[in-house]
Each structure stands twice: as C-alpha cells, then as structure tokens.
Image: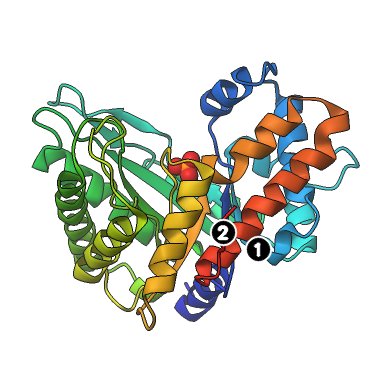
Amino acid sequence: MDINKLASVAQAMVADGKGLLAADESTGTIGKRFDTINVVSSADTRRDYRELLFKANDIEKFISGVILYDETIRQSASDGTSLVDLMLNKNIIPGIKVDTGAKPLAGSQNETVTEGLDGLAARVEEYVGLGAQFAKWRAVIKIGEDMPSGYAIHTNAHALARYAKICQEGGLVPIVEPEVLMDGVHDVEVCQHVTEETLNAVFGEIYAQGVELEAMILKPNMIIPGSDCVDTIDTLAIADRTVATLKRCVPAAVPGIMFLSGGQSEADATLNLNTMNAQNSNLPWKLSYSYGRALQASALKAWKGVKDNVVSAQKALTLRAKLNSEACKGNYLGE
Ligand code: 13P
C-alpha cells in the first residue's frame, strides 16, 4: 500500500471545481429510474445510458471521477472501447461501488447493515486490475420511531471502517458514505443530532481500525429537515448547520467531503453546496459533490431511451455538472 499515492488520488478527486458523478446504481435501482422514462432495463440499455453520460462533451472539466457499478466496469462502448478506457482518455478517474447493499440487521425490526466484507480484499484486487482507483460503500441510517438505534449506528460504522481499511490496503481510496436518510417527518435538529452521532461513531471506528485519514473521502448527507417535515428552512440555515456539524466531527486531515444529494432536487443540491462554499473560506477540507440523482435527473428525462435525444441528454448532464462546479467555488449564480 502506497499511502502517498492514494492521498494524491484523493486530492485529484476533489481538485478545484470538480466533483464526482455517482453512476453506480445497482441493477434494481437503475431499473426503477428507467421505469420513470419507460425504458426497459437490459445490459445493453444500461450500457447505452452510461456510455452517453461518460461521453458528454466537456464533462471532464467539471467531473474528476465516476463511481461505477460492477456490471459497468466490465462493459465496452458501442465502438468496442472499454468504458474505463473511455474515462481514462478524458482524464476521469474510475471508481467502483464495492458494498453489496443494505440488508436487514439481525435483532432489529426495520434497520439495515450494509454487507459486502466477505471476500472484499479479493474483489478489490480484481477492481484495481480493471482500472478502479477509488471505491464506495454506503451505509444507511434511518430516522423514525425508535430509530436510529445505537446498535445500527455502531454496526454500520464498524463495517464502514473495515471496508475503508481493506480498500486502502488493496490500493483503492475509500469513499466512506454514512447516509442519514431524508425520509420522514423529523425536523432539521433531529437530522443534525443523528448525523453528528453517526459521524462521531464512524470516525471513532476509523481511528480504532487505523484508516489513513489523508487517503479517504467522506460522503455525507447535508443537514436538512425530513422530506415530510412541515417546517421550511432556507439555504443559509442548511449551510450553517451542515458546516457546523462537519467541523465538530470530521478531522482536518480528511482531504475532501463530497456530498450525496439524497433526494434533493437538482437545483437545491447545487444551491446548498454553493451556500456552504460562499459562506466559508479556509475550511480544512474541500466541500464538493458526488451526486447521483441531482446530476442525472434532467439528463435521464431528456434521453427517454431515444438515440436522437442523446445530445440533449448529454447537454443536460454537462450543464448540471458545470453548475455544481461553480457551487464548489461559491460562484453559482442560480439556474
Ligand atoms: P444521490 O446523489 O442520488 O443520493 O446518490 C448518491 C449516491 O451515490 C448514493 O449512494
């Protein structure tokens, strides 16, 4: 393991004005996205869609890397170029989701623990051989009646740190993603409290298991009210609470924090990231994006599975990436 090399990959992931495209939807999840545009999900349609995204003109100006799914990292574009080479030719860093999903947590009614540790070292070795330079693992923390339990937080934090250490040993920069879900009626204070408890547990495990902070990326949720909460909140309050939480919980040695969008609209995810960067200078870490839905929603709608729509879908993706790139610098001026 060459930690300096991993640390420089982590720095490249959060290069100025750049973020990640999360295109690592599992086969089930991308199927649900395709249902919304009446496209049948097959290995070919999934390849066509991902090829469209990665080939979008100028995307490399705003995107440092892409998170891939196991199927995608093995696929080739229509001209036979592997999708990984297509990215490398544009200076885009390939990454890979290595967890195998959130599964029911034994001893809990409604909570999950993310699985995928068995055989992980061997899979990391294979993914490095396929060109991956970073990895992602998503833990899911739910807010609701009697949730989250300390048990769910700690089992997920333990697994996240185990995953991160295995990746670093195998030569991948781990993206550590403890997602506190937006679903629910809870207010912003509850989200903040649960997120702080979660991040403290995660960084406790990261320390206990010897994960190198300089060679990892944190991918957290923003501090926002539940999607069914009746309160309204402005972007300044979201930015203040999110940055306060991160300052309390995330060591300064971590090079970058790349948010998930978590169900926020494209415009909200961009605005909130922008407000954080516009309101704060001299933060110890870069604040950037690793969005799935908030980068792809317009592009998916524009595409609809039709060849003639490919260029307009690509334009929609590049525009979203450009606006988020501006948000990384606090320069976003609105839609
Ligand atoms: P969203 O931005 O759609 O939340 O997806 C990001 C991601 O990678 C979730 O694991």
Instruction: Please indicate, yes or no, whether residue 216 appears anywhere in the rendered image.
Output: no
The residue tagged 1 is 62
Quote the CA–CA distance across marks 1 and 2. Answer: 8 Å
The residue tagged 2 is 324
Element under disc 1:
loop
Q: Residue at x 46, y 50 (%)?
A: 269
**x then y, percent, for residue 187:** 19, 41
Is 279 on the left-hand or right-hand side of 157?
A: right
**x then y, percent, for residue 302:** 73, 33
Element under disc 2:
helix
Q: Which is more N-terminal, label 2 or label 1? A: 1
Looking at the rendering, which quadrant does residue 304 occupy?
top right
Image position of 327 with respect to 219: above or below:
below
Three-letter amino acid code at disc 2?
Asn
Is 187 on the left-hand or right-hand side of 314?
A: left
**x then y, percent, for residue 163:** 36, 52
